[in-house]
Amino acid sequence: METLQNILLGFAVALTPVNLFWCFVGVFLGTIVGILPGLGTPATIAILLPLSFQMNPATGLIMMAGIYYGSKYGGSTTSILMNLPGETASVVTCLDGYQMARQGRAGPALGIAAISSFVAGTVGILGLMLVAPPLARFALRFGPPEYFSLMALGLTMVIFLAGKSMIKGLLAALIGLWLASIGTDTFTAEPRFIFGRLELLDGVDFIVATIGIFAIGEVLVNLEEKTKIDLFKVPKGLRNLLPTLQDLKDCRFAFLNGSVVGFLIGVMPGAGATIASFLSYGLEKAVSKNPDKFGTGAIEGVAAPEGANNSETGGALVPLLTLGIPGSNSTAMLLAALTLWGMKPGPLLIQEHPEIFWGLVASMYVGNIMLLILNLPMVPLFAKILRVPNYFLYPVILGISVVGVYAVNSSMFDIWMLALFGILGYVMRKLDFPAAPLVLALVLGIRAEETFRQSLIMSQGDLSVFLTRPLSVIMLLTAAVLLAIPIFRWTQAWRKQTASEEN
Amino acid sequence: MKRSDLLSGLFLIGFGLFIIREASAMKYSYVHGPGPGFLPFWIGVLLVALALILATMSAFYFYSEKERKANRADWWKAIRVAGTWVAFLFMIALADKIGFILSFVIFTVFLVSAVDRRSLSTGITVALAIAFGFYLIFVYAFGLRLPVGPWGF
């Protein structure tokens, strides 16, 4: 009853014309930011912070949050249409989304991304509203061993992203781990593999590596086939651009998977939308009857990570608004905004400023509907990008990549790194090395090493620390089960082959 | 024998050995737990082991006739990719001297006219249109700072 009263208060705040207008501005800008690779959400929030000081804090937060979750919708667009992830969390959407576009199914891919984002985003807000306090308490119980086990669980996803060759997938993941180890060691401040370049002291920028490997690598591969792809085939008519009933039926589990995984990962500070999208993709593939379809244009491979990516937003706001703990760069910017407006993000925020917390929750419901309306009818418009000839498209992709990477740190060194990762992405494709395990390991590597070392310092070098804590054991057991799946499949395939040969 | 796997396997063995050598110069462990050299050392060891398996397996791979035809080296393709990448590097180097917008125009003209074999006029039109769009969106609308040349853009 109390929750109902609170949410009614929230809608009274969110549905005022001023808040509706700024909510729309936020989600619209967020969509654009998501589409533009490299132009990140934290940077956009930072740029707009001075403007929001003129606003009432509730209005400002509604707009800022709109940019945050709106960018999650937009991030899938370039992943699907150009194999260029607009946001880091949309990297995994490239795997099947781009393949769908190449097969002339760009429309359904964009449509399912929007629908899944809406469904999971709404579930995420429900989660934020209903289970915020107890879940935040649960996440607080996570110590370094639990975090390490979570990272280990994330790294097992490599086996689902390995493609044709498991060895090549593992090698790619090891290169990703090595890239993650570049920079200053957080425990001893000792530089590792910086090759005399001070720019590398902060490590390899994930955005630079991702855009280089995916976007530049893709352009170089496509340049080889001058006459092969001049124009992608785009289905005509809105009906053909939207997912079919069968597509929606195929994605039933993906919607649920994305919603739950995304929200739970979101609640854990530091885990982030990228891990959520990779985990939900891996889970979707693990339980699929046709895992071979993944990576070749499986619609579930778009729905699950996109859902997780959006549901994570609701989860990530839980520790921010109830404990004042930001779990990502974007929520850190929201924390900065709240502090600058004179708020004290923490357990007392909901009690002292109910109109801000509940107004934000209600505005997110409204914003999600706005985003669905914005994104679904605009699917044909986005799909039209595919009609652009390659000789126009490729310079645009290369140019946006350069601008996006430069915008992060204003560093020419980052652009040189972009070129280096571009050729690495090209070579990996030519030699059939999958790029996704490298990116996954790069994301998880730093945190995995940190938490592993913290755990051992905590236990004075005793490795059993990972096996004596229930949450850690559960996650490590899940990782072990996931690792056993391909071995089980190989054994089954080998048995079948032997039986057929004997017959 | 799958030559590409053999070569990548050999390269990765070398790369793994390099990582092991570098990691050996770092502290492997402290009193309680691993030091900065711990993770890189094991990355190197695993790289060498897996790359060795890859290289060995490549020796037992036999191409089908179809694969043999598909894998035949096409030097024209390689030149096109290498040319584009080198031009991209030139664009980066020039961006610092003459500004991003102008260096991007030169790069795009090369990409459209030389790599994609369109007419020079198409190349110039496309390059100017995209560069103008970039300037309008990123510099004018978003207020991003891009490398500028002596002309102020």
Image (cartoon, rainbow, N blue to C red):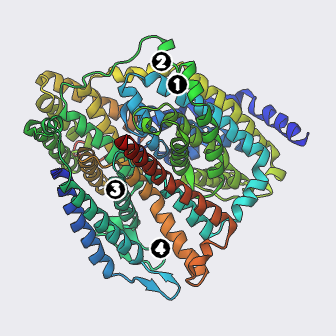
Of the numbered discs 2 and 3, the one sitting upstream in the chain is 3
Q: Mark 1 or 2 closer to N-term?
A: 1
What kind of residue is marked 1? Gly
Quadrant occupied by the C terminus of chain B: top left
Which image quadrant is residue A63 in? top right
Amino acid type assigned to the residue bearing label 4 in the image: Thr
CB-based contact (under 8 Å), mark 1 and mark 4: no
Q: Quadrant of residue A363?
A: top right
Task: Give the number of the mark in front: 4 or 3.
Answer: 3
Counting the numbered discs, the total is: 4
Q: Determine the CA span between mark 1 and mark 4.
A: 43 Å
Q: In 3D space, how far apart are the residues under numbered discs 1 and 2 (Cα atoms)?
A: 7 Å
Identify the residue at horizontal 20%, vertical 34% (top origin): A223
Q: Earlier in the sequence, mark 4 or mark 3?
A: 3
Q: Which residue is labeled 1 in the image?
A: A111
Labels 2 & 3 near each other (Cβ < 8 A): no
x, y percent for residue B8: 21, 56
Residue A406, position as x, y percentages in the image: 35, 49
Q: Is residue A439 left or right of residue A485?
A: left
On screen, A388 above or below B8?
above
Circle 2 residues within 10 Å: few <14, some 14–19, many ≥20: many
User: Could you say which is closer to the camera, residue A104 or residue B70?
Assistant: B70
Location of mark 3 (residue): A167
Return the disc, 4 or 2, that comes first in the chain's sequence.
4
SS for callout 1:
helix
The chain letter under disc 2 is: A
- Cα distance, mark 4 to mark 2? 49 Å
Q: Label 2 belongs to which residue?
A: A241
Badge 3 amino acid: Ile
Residue at the spot 51% in from the left edge and 70% down from the top edge: A450
Marked residue nearer the N-terminal end (1 or 3): 1
* Residue plotted at (28% across, 43% down): A217
